[in-house]
Amino acid sequence: MNKIKILLKFLEKRYGYPKISGNRFKLLITTVLSQRTRDENTYKASQQLFKAAKTPEEISKLSVKELEKLIKPSGMYRQKAKRIKEISKIILEKYKGKVPDNREELISLPGVGFKTADIVLSYGFGIPTIAVDTHVNRIPKRIGIVGKNANVEEVRKTLEKYVSGKKRFLVNMGLVKFGQEICRPINPKCNVCPINKICDYYKSLNKKT
């Protein structure tokens, strides 16, 4: 599909390939903290948490109240605190302190869905999969790569059908940055978008005018 080729070339040139994380546990917990909150809130919460506790052992020793206080900036902190404590205990007891490296075991952890699991697999283990967050779900639909009514799993499967190997690492992080910078949820900067020529949404705007 020509649109995907153009998109991938743009993402690679503008944002490049992301680095693989050296700490899979931190990546997992940070991704849980990032659910339904803004990046700046995730950063603040994760900084406070990891300053106090960095490992499954250390987090397991904290009370839920202590965790709530540390991660409060992330929002939904009561629910997230319970989940993070449970995740830490499971990883410590069931997986001997190591984060599992497959989707099935990851999504069995409390509060870990497909997106979180795929981020850990991609950027923690270097396994080429595509994590579908709000930006990855929205932008391919706007461009016309995926149908407007496609669900999250359909978006992932469609993208993985046309994007293979290491190119998959460009998709999530690249589209997140692109979605924050240009292809925003509200008031996207279509006029300055470098790939607006391939975008169905941009074409529809021009038809209206």
Image: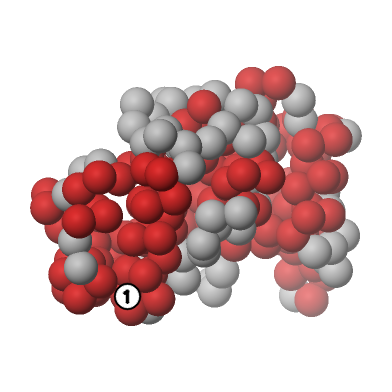
In which image quadrant can residue 201 be found?
bottom right
Residue at the image position 19 percent from the left and 61 percent from the top: 62
Residue at the image position 32 percent from the left and 69 percent from the top: 81
In which image quadrant can residue 190 be found?
bottom right
Q: Is 79 rendered above or below residue 105? A: below
Provide the secondary structure element on which disc 1 rests.
Answer: helix
Does residue 46 appear left or right of residue 146 in this picture?
Answer: left
The answer to which of 170 and 14 lies nearer the viewer is 170
The answer to which of 208 and 15 lies nearer the viewer is 15
User: Percent from the top left, x then y, of residue 49?
Assistant: 20, 56
User: Percent from the top left, x then y, of residue 16?
Assistant: 48, 27
User: Percent from the top left, x then y, of residue 187?
Assistant: 54, 72
User: Percent from the top left, x then y, of residue 2?
Assistant: 84, 33
Q: Type of residue at label 1?
A: Tyr
Q: Can residue 204 be seen by looking at this rendering? A: yes
Q: Can residue 190 be seen by looking at this rendering? A: no
> Going by the picture, which residue comes out furthest to the top?
165
**For the N terminus, which image quadrant?**
top right
> Going by the picture, which residue comes out furthest to the front?
93
Total number of numbered labels? Answer: 1
In which image quadrant can residue 40 be found?
bottom left
Q: Which residue is mark 1?
A: 77
Residue at the image position 58 percent from the left and 46 percent from the top: 106
The answer to which of 66 and 124 lies nearer the viewer is 66
Q: Residues within 10 Å of mark 1 (few under 14, many from 20)?
A: many
**For the C terminus, which image quadrant?**
bottom right
The answer to which of 104 and 151 lies nearer the viewer is 104
Residue at the image position 68 percent from the left and 45 percent from the top: 104
